[in-house]
């Protein structure tokens, strides 16, 4: 059973998501909250598998709520998916930095929403290579923010290489082909890099790569 918490200030939006999710076998909505502060309280009380959190809410934004959830060791297994009306904007990027596992547009088709919940529940980031490349185009042209980025000196040369390739939007299979290694080895390198950097998932690993200056929009 995949347990989901809904955090959105629009009651109609919450009702729509709840109706869709409650009708699906294997998914249970464990609670709702109308602002970020109550959302954090809900997540701490219920410890769901997934928290669907709106970006812009009263009292506390979805970004701050995500940051607090990601920083709580007792909520390490909770995956945050950001809900947005606007697609890939500054809010989404900040949410990924804060620890979100991905994002969904509020007008996502029902089947896509259900699939997304299953993907995130498996521990995968809700960022396809195509979306990663869009993130690169939208946000990677800014100067690296080394003041907030983790140090990369803990990574081996191979781990830095796979991290850079992942940040450019390559899948594990594409990374394996590029480096002439097996997909399993590529996945292992990425997993180790995530562990060393404290990245919750691949999405945050991509953000780390750009903020540290390991890669830039020009691919240097």
Image (spheres, rainbow, N blue to C red):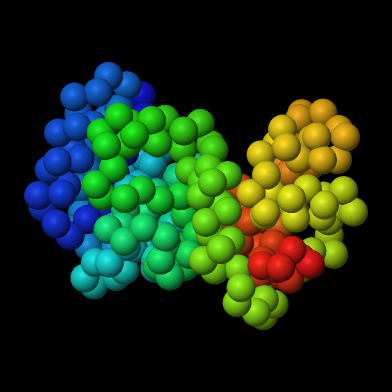
* 198 left or right, relative to 61: right
The answer to whether residue 26 shows anywhere in this view is yes
Residue at x 38%, y 41% (from the top left corner) = 50
Quadrant showing the N terminus: top left
* 212 left or right, relative to 60: right
Residue at x 54%, y 46% (from the top left corner) = 130
* 34 left or right, relative to 119: left
Residue 30, compared with residue 54, is above or below; it is above
Query: Of residues 137 and 18, which is closer to you in this image?
Result: 137
Quadrant showing the C terminus: bottom right
Residue 82 coordinates in the image, percent (x, y): 37, 54
Residue at x 54%, y 68% (from the top left corner) = 139
**The furthest residue to the top:** 25
Residue 180 coordinates in the image, percent (x, y): 88, 34
Residue 110, compared with residue 37, is above or below; it is above
Q: In which quarter of the image is residue 137?
A: bottom right
Q: Quadrant of residue 150?
A: bottom right
Residue 34, compared with residue 21, is above or below; it is below
């Amino acid at each position: 059973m995949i347990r989901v918490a809904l955090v959105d200030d629009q009651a109609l939006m919450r009702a729509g998501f709840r109706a869709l999710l409650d009708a699906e076998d294997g998914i249970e909505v464990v609670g709702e909250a109308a602002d970020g502060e109550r959302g954090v309280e809900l997540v701490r009380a219920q410890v769901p598998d997934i928290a669907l959190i709106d970006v812009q809410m009263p009292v506390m934004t979805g970004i701050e709520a995500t940051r607090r959830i990601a920083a709580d060791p007792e909520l390490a297994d909770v995956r945050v998916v950001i809900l947005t009306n606007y697609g890939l904007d500054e809010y989404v990027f900040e949410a990924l930095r804060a620890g979100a596992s991905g994002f969904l547009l509020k007008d996502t088709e029902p089947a896509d929403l259900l699939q997304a919940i299953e993907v995130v529940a498996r521990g995968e980031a809700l960022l396809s290579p195509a979306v990663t490349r869009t993130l690169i185009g939208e946000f990677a042209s800014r100067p690296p923010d080394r003041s907030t980025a983790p140090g990369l000196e803990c990574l081996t040369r191979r781990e830095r290489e796979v991290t850079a390739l992942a940040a450019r939007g390559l899948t594990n299979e594409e990374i394996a082909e590029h480096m002439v290694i097996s997909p399993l080895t590529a996945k292992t390198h990425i997993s180790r890099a995530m562990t060393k950097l404290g990245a919750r998932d691949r999405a945050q690993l991509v953000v780390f790569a750009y903020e540290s200056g390991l890669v830039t929009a020009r691919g240097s």
